[in-house]
Image (cartoon, rainbow, N blue to C red):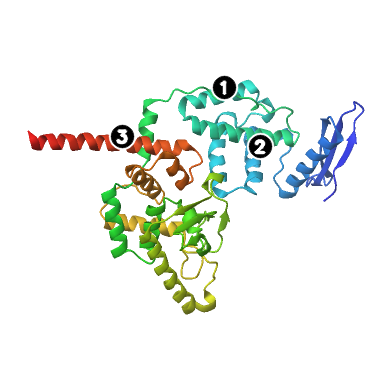
């Protein structure tokens, strides 16, 4: 790779020239030159970025630079060190800009044009979603500024419109929070116990009794379990988007508030102790085929269990328990929260136990639950009066 040539122009501004191979038709060297930088440092830094892009094959010359081609280019660079789930989300958000500005030159998108688009989106989507789209827009244009392709970022200081929460939005939020009622949970756990496959009963009891996120559960190691104190320590989460047995990563949990130690129930402690004995037998049986990384919820080769397997097993057991609800592993977290609320546990304690950094998350479930409980109370009252009258 040739180094960039950094030089000062007669007008006192700095420029860079980066060579990027040979032009196939003319057989002459291809170069990218860009000037107008105030300092040598700025020119050098922009040139470094271009060189890296040329090397990765993700650079497009400015002349053909439509918004769409640049955005597609940016996502390639972004995906080199972002989680797959983030790349998926960004690609989806990006489409809301591409659909309107795709063929426009990148340089033509002004602050006014950008603000107008955000206002349009805000009329159709929730504040949260528009916030995500705007964050994506900021990253795309920041990248263009860093490469020296545009001078100013049109997304700077853009105001997200003030929101009126629509009734439909409140109703659709109500719908989303699926959890099992106490009786359904009991039936489900009984079914998992009697008809579950290897580890099913333990996994679902653990989810229901701890409210852990599924990634946090699957990342648990034996060192996180304190039998004396009866507690589990949550410090990491398992990331395995492709459900490839060996290609998993242990990441820090969702937020710093998610790092926590929680007390667990006698029943769960006993189950974990029984499981430890079974796992030791499995290790002996498998010998060096068992890759021992100390995972509690390990498959019989020692690797952590796959989320996909948990989801499939869950569907199977819901069918057997005759529960027709769209329940996911995360629903057990809501179920746990709702049971804590019913048991009269305070908001602050719930927030700490579940590792909700944001009190709103707890409050939403709280509101949902208390509405549920009020409805039950009024129903019980009318039943009682029916019997009396």
Question: For residue 72, which quarter of the picture?
Answer: top right
**Along the line of sight, the residue nearer the viewer: 211 or 194:** 211
Q: How crowded is mark 1: few (under 14 residues within 10 Å), some or many (20 or more)?
A: few
For residue 241, above or below residue 140: below
Disc 3 secondary structure class: helix
**Which label belongs to residue 70?**
2
**Which label belongs to residue 116?**
1
What x and y, as percent, mark residue 19? Answer: 83, 44
Residue under numbered circle 3 = 371
Disc 1 secondary structure class: helix
| For marks 2 and 1 on the same chain, the one whose residue lies earlier in the sequence | 2
**Tags 3 and 2 touching, CB below 8 Å:** no
Query: At x 84% / y 29%, what residue is drawn?
Result: 38
User: Is residue 50 rendered to the left or right of residue 318?
Assistant: right
Q: How crowded is mark 2: few (under 14 residues within 10 Å), some or many (20 or more)?
A: many
| For marks 3 and 2 on the same chain, the one whose residue lies earlier in the sequence | 2
**Tags 2 and 1 touching, CB below 8 Å:** no
What x and y, as percent, mark residue 61? Answer: 74, 38
User: Is residue 111 rendered to the left or right of residue 214?
Assistant: right
Instruction: Work out how far the residue at label 1 is from the one at label 3, CA to CA, in angstroms.
Output: 39 Å
Dot in front, 3 or 2: 3
User: Is residue 170 rendered to the left or right of residue 6?
Assistant: left
| For marks 1 and 3 on the same chain, the one whose residue lies earlier in the sequence | 1
Dot in front, 2 or 1: 1
User: Is residue 192 rendered to the left or right of residue 138?
Assistant: left
Dot in front, 1 or 3: 3
Q: Is residue 266 visible?
A: yes
Instruction: Work out how far the residue at label 2 is from the one at label 1, CA to CA, in angstroms.
Output: 21 Å
């Amino acid at each position: 790779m040739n180094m960039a040539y950094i030089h000062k122009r007669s007008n006192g501004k700095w420029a860079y020239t980066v060579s990027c191979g040979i032009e196939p038709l003319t057989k002459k060297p291809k170069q990218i030159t860009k000037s107008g930088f105030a300092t040598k440092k700025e020119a050098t830094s922009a040139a470094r970025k271009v060189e890296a892009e040329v090397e990765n094959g993700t650079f497009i010359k400015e002349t053909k630079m439509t918004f769409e081609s640049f955005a597609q280019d940016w996502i390639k660079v972004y995906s080199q060190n972002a989680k797959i789930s983030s790349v998926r989300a960004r690609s989806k958000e990006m489409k809301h800009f591409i659909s309107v500005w795709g063929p426009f030159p990148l340089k033509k998108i002004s602050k006014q044009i950008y603000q107008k688009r955000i206002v349009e989106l805000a009329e159709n989507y929730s504040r949260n979603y528009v916030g995500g789209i705007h964050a994506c827009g900021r990253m795309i244009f920041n990248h263009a500024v860093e490469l020296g392709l545009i001078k100013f970022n049109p997304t700077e200081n853009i105001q997200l419109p003030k929101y009126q929460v629509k009734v439909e939005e409140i109703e659709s939020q109500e719908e989303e929070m699926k959890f099992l009622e106490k009786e359904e949970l009991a039936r489900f756990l009984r079914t998992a116990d009697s008809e579950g496959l290897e580890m099913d009963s333990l996994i679902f009891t653990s989810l229901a009794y701890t409210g852990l996120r599924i990634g946090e559960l699957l990342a648990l190691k034996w060192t996180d379990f304190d039998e004396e104190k009866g507690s589990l320590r949550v410090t990491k989460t398992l990331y395995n988007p492709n459900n490839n047995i060996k290609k998993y990563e242990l990441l820090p949990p969702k937020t710093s508030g998610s790092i926590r130690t929680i007390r667990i129930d006698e029943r769960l402690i006993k189950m974990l102790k029984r499981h430890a004995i079974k796992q030791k037998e499995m290790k002996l049986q498998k010998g060096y085929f068992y890759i021992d990384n100390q995972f509690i919820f390990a498959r019989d080769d020692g690797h952590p269990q796959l989320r996909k397997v948990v989801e499939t097993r869950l569907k199977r057991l819901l069918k057997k328990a005759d529960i027709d609800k769209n329940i996911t592993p995360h629903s057990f977290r809501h179920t746990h929260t709702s049971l804590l609320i019913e048991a009269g546990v305070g908001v602050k304690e719930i927030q700490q136990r579940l590792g909700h950094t944001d009190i709103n998350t707890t409050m939403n479930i709280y509101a949902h639950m208390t509405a549920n409980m009020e409805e039950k109370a009024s129903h019980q009252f009318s039943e009682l009066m029916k019997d009396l009258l």
